[in-house]
Image (spheres, rainbow, N blue to C red):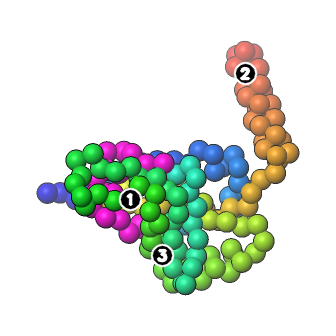
Amino acid sequence: MAREQGNKVIARNRRARHDYHIEDVYEAGVALTGTEVKSLRAGRASLADGFAQVSDGEVWLHNVHIPEYTQGTWTNHEPRRTRKLLLHRGEIDRLVSKTAEQGLTLIPLSLYFKDGRVKVELALARGKRTYDKRHDLARRDAAREVDRALRRRR
């Protein structure tokens, strides 16, 4: 059988860019069981409440929901189990020093297949305040109005 090529997005965390200022982005592999991969191939996952945490020199992904595989048996996985992320030692050390800063957290932006392997796009982010969110929405609305006006003039 031929190896898969390219990227196929499984799930995106749409609220992440609304709720956080993204400072830096990392790509990490995910240690999964067989039924988790089969469930992901069916395109089922949720990153809504997910976050990552560094403990004992390892990065762990928490609260990511991968539903049970429908054809699975007693070997099925737990939907919200903690999963290990696969990163290089230098990247982990950088994340440890950055998350030690006040207010920085690790959140998953997207989950995807890259050349047949499951990867997660992990962001180092700082939480937005409500007035920042309102300001971003107002800026987006103003840009949309300008685009509409320019289209009407043509």
Q: Residue at x 27, y 45 (%)?
A: 70
Residue under the image location 45 percent in, 71 percent down: 84
Q: Earlier in the sequence, mark 3 or mark 2?
A: 3
Give residue 102's position: percent from left, percent from top. 78, 71
- Which residue, given by chain and number where applicable, does mark 3 sit on? 87
Residue lying at 34% horizontally and 51% vertically, measured from the top left: 68
In contact (CB < 8 Å): disc 2 and disc 1: no
- Residue 144 is labelled as none
Could one spot residue 54 in this view of the protein? yes
CA–CA distance in space, label 3 to label 1: 23 Å
Mark 2, residue position: 148
Q: Which residue is mark 1?
A: 78
Q: Residues within 10 Å of mark 3 (few under 14, many from 20)?
A: some
Q: Secondary structure at mark 1?
A: loop
**Which of the 4 image quadrants contains residue 103?**
bottom right
Q: Evaluate if marks 3 and 1 touch, with contact meaning CB atoms under 8 Å apart.
A: no
Circle 1 residues within 10 Å: few <14, some 14–19, many ≥20:
few
Q: Nearer the viewer, residue 23 or 107?
A: 107
Between label 3 and label 1, give the one nearer the viewer.
1
Kind of residue at badge 2: Arg
From which residue to which does the magenta span run?
A: 28-46
